[in-house]
Image (tube, grey):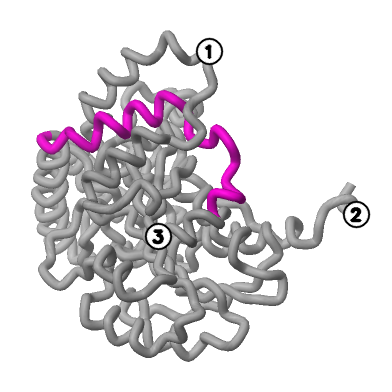
Amino acid sequence: MKELVQKSALAVKPYIPGKPIEETKRQLGLKQIFKLASNENPLGPSPKAVNAIKKCLAGINRYPDSKGFYLKKKLAKYFSLSAENFVLGNGSDELIDVLIKTFVEPDENIVTADTTFLEYKIIAQVNARKVKKAALRYFKYDLEAILKLVDKKTKLIFIANPNNPTGTYVTREEVKKFLNALPERVIVVFDEAYDAFIDVDDYPNSLSYLKNRKKIVILRTFSKAYGLAGLRLGYAIAQPELVTYMERIRQPFNVNSLAQAAGLAAIDDSDFLKKTRRLTLEGKNFIYQELSKMGLGYVPSVANFILIDTGTDSLKVFKSMLKFGVIVRDMKQYGLNNFIRLTIGTPKENSRSMQVLRKVLGGQSR
């Protein structure tokens, strides 16, 4: 059967998602699981979004609004933009696929970092497009190194800001310098899935770049801070001309009616967003303190997760923690063999994760 498969598909190493809670319960016979592997909101979904979903359940026999008219209108008002600035997607993953299919010719290439969101490379491979990768510098995007990889065939640059899995970010001044040096023909995609957790002053306002540079695309999501990961709802922000071309490639009815209703309501749930931010910042500080007590290194994060250097084989750490009902993310797929990624959870989840980590590492400082 292998001879029937496209060569580009054979080269793909599938994305490995965080281990599901129910599967873990079933396999290990555990009653309580703490999933801290997929950067989900531990508070659950926005309550306003849940109520909105309940109200529209009776209408799921109908196809959703393919254009997402009301959600785009709401987003436009929230960002002081036009509805023509938005493309809705079945999560950011679909929008990455749409971007590559819309703008990158077979002989053109994409540039990004070597340790970043894996879907940039995976989706490019599925579409038989070449990806050029620059090494991180101190766990952070090196924009100067990315510039050096840009050639006449470069069409898209993906910058995850904050970066997943490191939690680091590029600053306002770094981005300004980068954009000034970049050829106008190249489209820059700022993937800002974790923007709602930012607590630093020098984080760039990517929306301001839309006015001065036409070839900018910003990706946002409802999966993280708003707790709607199970509904798969993301959106791209760009100049209307770019949006028009992306809409040609986007699948009809790609965003279901429940997701659209939930997104509409979640935008207004400022109290839930504030609570989520507060929980994340307080939890992050607690985990930093605990890691320091254990003598473990970590990468300071502006997102809702922390990259932790366990000092030993991360797969073994992952499996050992799993036995105690704590799911973390093993980073071997990213080439970080001694690292795990831990999502910030509730106080109870954070405390348990640190207890288990201390136990599986022998309770000794490195």
Q: How would you rate the neighbour count of disc 2 (Cα within 10 Å): few for under 14, some for 14-19, many for 20 or more?
A: few
- Write down the residue under mark 2: 3
Asked whether, in this view, residue 256 is left or right of residue 361, the answer is right
Instruction: Give the residue drawn at x 39%, y 78%.
Output: 136
Under tag 3, what secondary structure?
strand
Q: Give the residue type at disc 2.
A: Glu
Instruction: Give the residue drawn at x 36%, y 76%.
Output: 141
- Write down the residue under mark 1: 61
Q: How would you rate the neighbour count of disc 3 (Cα within 10 Å): few for under 14, some for 14-19, many for 20 or more?
A: many
Q: Is residue 280 above or below residue 55?
A: below
Q: Is residue 188 above or below residue 313?
A: below
Dominant SS type (magenta):
helix
Residue 265: quarter of image:
top left
Circle 3/circle 2 CB separation < 8 Å: no
The foreground one among 20 and 70 is 70
Q: What is the spatial separation of the Cα atoms under label 2 and label 1, in whole angstroms?
A: 41 Å
Q: Give the residue type at disc 3.
A: Ala
Q: Find the magenta span and give its range.
A: 246-271
Q: Where is residue 193 drawn, in percent x and y?
A: 33, 53
The foreground one among 227 and 280 is 227
- Write down the residue under mark 3: 238
Q: What is the spatial separation of the Cα atoms under label 3 and label 2, in whole angstroms?
A: 40 Å
The foreground one among 196 and 32 is 196
Asked whether, in this view, residue 212 is left or right of residue 59, the answer is left
Name the mark nearer the viewer: 2 or 1.
Answer: 1
Name the mark nearer the viewer: 3 or 2.
Answer: 3
Q: Give the residue type at disc 1.
A: Asn
